[in-house]
Image (spheres, grey):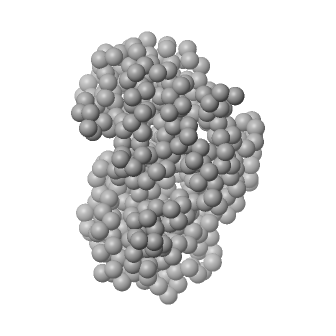
Amino acid sequence: MRRRDLLTAAATSAVAAGTTGLAAAGPASAQGKGHGSKGGVRTGFETLRRSGYASVTGQRVGIISNPTGIDRELNHIVDVMVADAAVNLVAIFGPEHGFRGIGQAGEGEEFFIDEKTGLPVYNAYNNSATMERLFSDLELDTVVFDIQEVGARFYTYIWTMYLALEAAARLGVKFVVLDRPTPLSGKDAYGPVLHPEHSTFVGLKAIAQQHGMTPGELARLYNEVFVPAATGGKRADLHVQRLSGWDRRMRYTDTGLPWVAPSPNMPTLATADIYVGTCLFEASALSEGRGTTQPFQLIGAPGIDHRWEKALNAREMPGVRFREAYFKPVFSKQQDKTCGGVEVLVTDVDRFEPIPTALAMITEQWRLFPEYRWRSQDVTSFWMDKLSGDTRVREAIESGTDAADIPEVWYDDLKRFRKLRGEFLIYR
């Protein structure tokens, strides 16, 4: 089988019950359907609570969380923990968008006192030095992380977790991850792997664009591979409070867990299903739908018309259809302009391939509407290189490479990452 065929097959059957090779385990027809008892999944917080908070009792605890840190009854875990004498919770740390989730892209939340609990809330967004200083000044024994992630390398919560884990390693502070499934954590890793020269807060370390891991699994990889390299060999005292009842083949909707928007432009599970692909349009001059009610599902710009939808549907990509769409963003790119484009509609989440789909969208748009290219023409700072993590992806698009052939450029990197990833999977 040629590399192109092998990569396409791997993306199509993207559920990997612990596999580290290029082919995922199990037939496509079985993925995500009827596995596990609906409603039987317990998050890491729920298993921690059932243990009587065994891993944090008697310690000064800080927590990194946001509105997604909830239990099954929609109670925020900060409120639950503060009310329990077994936990001494002394501080809260907010990631991008803040603890309350009110900040837009690239924004944190300034210091405040939470009125409900009386706890101080600090901004932990993209600042490792601040986290290390605060953990030390607050004399924390343990830092807890509980945030809903979506499975994309450029979703910054996983890098807040990394920086906090690094700070914990330097200080000798225990780090507890309360694990949660993500919409993509049952899928295999896919897409380009970050090259070090493109390290930013939308991708600090060499993981795949679609990493296919839970936060707890990622933390294990970080702590063994990346943290020691940054701390002179130190590792954090890492504890992953595991999920109970979760099967890698389950869709998120099979878990019975409630969904709370993890960031302002991630309102629904439908958004999360496609974000790891269509977020690449942040690098484009086109609007990625920010400033509309369907971010990352509506893509377009002034002057784009029905020809794009026709070309995309003609490709007959698995699990997706496109609708000709028109919209006017109220903020962000193309603000207050009438944009033509497409709405991305996932018809079969098990067969849908978000990264190949997004690459097909970009290459067809370049062919039909070449007036729209990258959002920056400064060759030293293409945003596409930061998002993909690999300059060769942008160069392949610019050279007119067909979308189906672009995965060739990351084949070897992805193969190595899949092998590494397999060493740290918890749920197999």
Closer to the camera in the image, 285 or 250? 285
Residue 247 placed where, x, y %?
70, 54
Q: State whether residue 137 appears in this view.
A: yes
The residue shown at (62%, 70%) is 47
Residue 285 placed where, x, y %?
30, 28
The residue shown at (36%, 38%) is 385
Residue 313 placed where, x, y %?
54, 17
Q: State whether residue 341 appears in this view.
A: no
Q: Is residue 300 left or right of residue 258?
A: left
State the count of labels: 0
Q: Is residue 376 left or right of residue 20?
A: left
Residue 68 placed where, x, y %?
47, 58
Quarter holding the N terminus? top right
Closer to the camera in the image, 1 or 348? 1
Query: Measured along the vertical axis of the image, is residue 361 above or below residue 256?
Result: above
Query: Measured along the vertical axis of the image, is residue 273 above or below residue 204?
Result: above
Quarter holding the C terminus? bottom right
Q: Is residue 192 left or right of residue 246?
A: left
The residue shown at (40%, 15%) is 367
Query: Measured along the vertical axis of the image, is residue 7 above or below residue 107?
Result: above
The residue shown at (61%, 60%) is 424
Residue furthest to the bottom = 58
Query: Measured along the vertical axis of the image, is residue 343 above or below residue 272?
Result: above
Closer to the camera in the image, 19 or 272? 19
